[in-house]
Amino acid sequence: MAQSILKFENVSKTYGNLLALDGINFSVYQNEIIGLIGPNGAGKTTALKLIARLLIPNEGRILIKTHKGHLQDIRIHEKNLVEMGFLIDIPHFYNTNPASLLRLIAKIRNYPKNQIEDRMDTLLKSFNLYEWKYKKIKTFSKGMVQKLGFCTAIIHDPEVVILDEPQTGLDPQSRITIREYLRNLKKEGKTIIISSHLLEEIREICDKIALINQGKLVGYDTIDNLEITYKTKELICEIETPIASSDRKEFLEKIEHLLRNYLEKENDDSIIKDAVSYNSDKQCILIKYNGLNTAKSKILEILSQYLSNNYKITSFYEPKITQLERIYSKMINKEND
């Protein structure tokens, strides 16, 4: 059974009259990648700063695993805790160079002195910064500074890595590099908590998501389980020929009737609104279905038969990124009701 490595116990944090976090409870297990998502001002960065001990909770406590394997309040004997690495907010550095900066952080973090140079060079090469090793950071682009910030978070090979919007300012190739590096850290047994507005990145790498809204934890589970809870399964059927606007109403009603046994339903067993819709820009039929694997093949079979005379299906698939966006939207809307 996986071991808990970090735990929030009824954690609240206020800034004056503003309640930033309101009784947050959740556990993170060793070797998990957890994604924190939520609107601006929801409390995500506050949660990360509490873990980093940059802030102190007004109520509750945060527990981190110690070198002996048990959980301990982060405010007590911090030297007993496992090593953690942090990238909080957009990094800003003194006008030094990467070599001096990384050496200093590695020494402060008690990384073995005889291994610092090799560790530093390996990281700089991994993120295409090696040729900038001795150049002033003030000459760096925003993306280069962000990659250097990531290097500072992991230079000492921490067991827990905390990242706040690590993809900010990065080009697509750098995002891929960071994503792959995080996957490799997981393979090494590291635990990672990452806050991001980029839902596609969260979908790609995270084992679970924690959705925070107005200071409250409104959802915490695997994406697959949240899809079941919030009934977010969707299928897209792309067709070669557009449907004339005059025919759409009758066309969609007919498809809804044919697929009625496989569509998403309300609690009273009535079919949800817009269970079947049409996107004219992308020439596709969108189907919100019951999420069962057996239903997907049946839906394709029915559509193929019905459309065969007038329309050609060019693609039929379940959009993964859209699923997370729908989960996000449903959870936020439910909490705000």
Image (tube, rainbow, N blue to C red):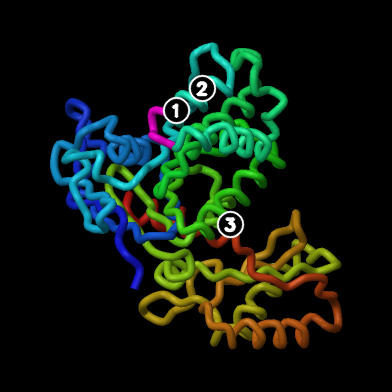
In this view, 189 is above or below 174: below
Q: Which residue is the site of mark 1?
A: 105
In this view, 249 is above or below 101: below
Type of the residue with mark 3: Glu
Image point (44%, 50%), residue name: 192
Q: Which residue is the site of mark 2?
A: 101
- State the image coordinates of residue 108 (x, y, percent, origin top left): 38, 28
Q: Mark 1 and mark 2: span between their CA atoms?
A: 6 Å
- State the image coordinates of residue 14 (x, y, percent, origin top left): 20, 33
Q: Are marks 3 and 1 in contact (CB under 8 Å)?
A: no
- State the image coordinates of residue 184 (x, y, percent, origin top left): 57, 54
- State the image coordinates of residue 77 (x, y, percent, origin top left): 18, 40
Of residue 294 and residue 135, the one placed in the foreground of this image is: 135
Magenta span: 107-111
Q: Secondary structure at mark 1?
A: helix
Name of the residue lying farthest toward the front = 114
Q: Which residue is the site of mark 3?
A: 204
Q: Are marks 1 and 2 in contact (CB under 8 Å)?
A: yes
Asked whether residue 325 appears in the rendered view, the answer is no
